[in-house]
Amino acid sequence: MPALITYRTPVQEDWVDYNGHLRDAYYLLIFSYATDALMERIGLDADNRGQSGNSLFTLEAHINYLHEVKLGTEVWVQTQIVGFDQKRLHVYHSLHRKGCEEALAASEQMLLHVDLKGPKSAPFSTRTLQALEQITEQQRDLPAPLYINRTLRLPMDK
Amino acid sequence: MPALITYRTPVQEDWVDYNGHLRDAYYLLIFSYATDALMERIGLDADNRGQSGNSLFTLEAHINYLHEVKLGTEVWVQTQIVGFDQKRLHVYHSLHRKGCEEALAASEQMLLHVDLKGPKSAPFSTRTLQALEQITEQQRDLPAPLYINRTLRLPMDK
């Protein structure tokens, strides 16, 4: 299977700085919308219109900025499942545009499945686990994510 | 010196989800504004109104989400310099509110000093290096950042 495309959007006016370039936080907003789309695909609801009563909370994210992106550029997000357990999901999003072979940005994220009634962490339903297993199986032959398990450090850090 | 407070804001309506909680990407937007404020403090300009012709680009960021934050809550960012070299700056932002001793979120970021005429990476000016040294010296006795040099991993990751 080709990479799973979870979200497409043009870069919007509210998202750019005075230079017309996508501001750092808005790369993460695009990835956040991609997570919403992934949730729907695995039987969770990205908002309260649905009935599952469950959601994914972001515990932690790491993002690498690789290229600038200009106002109006059509971009899309590819999403890879890195791993999951009964309550947690480790995903890898990358941002792309036509004409640029390399990703524009990449972000790995750790997400926690939450019962909104608590809110408290809760195991995934069988349906969601099956959906995650199916995607993982379909992505078996994808190359490993490039920007993953990284730490930030300078030689002179305290 | 107490921690350096770089930015204060109430949580705005555009930034919250249907539950009235700050969406993950907007924590990073608040930290992005804090970086803008830090830039002004060290002699760089956060936008093109200034004359320096230089800016900071975010190369990489890691963010930990620790507590939910509700619409309207007054929050502030504390910023610590982790390290820097001739062109790069490693900062640690944490988000806080009154009545919550623990940080609401924390983010370490690697920033690159850029000459906007290129754009290309460029050494910091002597004035900026002196400002960074001064802040580092003032922060010598601050406790070490809690959420730093971390990797994301699940036992069952591929």
Image (cartoon, coloured by chain):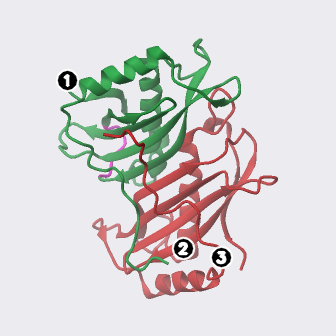
Chain colours: A red, B green
What are the residue bounds of the magenta stretch? B67-73
Residue A135 in the image, given as x and y percentages of width and height: 59, 81
- Identify the residue position indicated by label 3 in the image: A142
Q: Residues within 10 Å of mark 2 (few under 14, many from 20)?
A: many
Number of numbered discs visible in the structure rendering? 3
Q: Residues within 10 Å of mark 1 (few under 14, many from 20)?
A: few
Furthest-top residue in this view: B51
The answer to whether mark 2 and mark 3 are in CB contact below 8 A is no
Q: Mark 2 or mark 3: which comes first in sequence?
A: 2
Kindly identify the amino acid type of the residue bearing the numbered disc 3.
Leu
**Residue A71 visible from this viewpoint:** yes
Q: A106 above or below A132?
A: above
Kindly identify the amino acid type of the residue bearing the numbered disc 2.
Ile
- Identify the residue position indicated by label 2 in the image: A81
**Residue B23 visible from this viewpoint:** no
- Residue drawn at x 54%, y 73% as measured from the top left: A81
- Residue drawn at x 55%, y 25% as measured from the top left: B123
The answer to whether mark 3 and mark 1 are in CB contact below 8 A is no
Residue B49 in the image, given as x and y percentages of width and height: 60, 14
Q: Are marks 3 and 1 in one subunit?
A: no
Closer to us: B14 or A21: A21
Relative side of B100 to A66, left or right: left
Q: Are marks 2 and 3 in one subunit?
A: yes
SS under mark 2: strand
- Identify the residue position indicated by label 1 in the image: B1
Chain letter of disc 2? A
Q: B103 above or below A90?
A: above
In three-dimensional space, the C-alpha distance between marks 3 and 1, rounded to whole angstroms, equals 50 Å
In three-dimensional space, the C-alpha distance between marks 2 and 3, rounded to whole angstroms, equals 10 Å
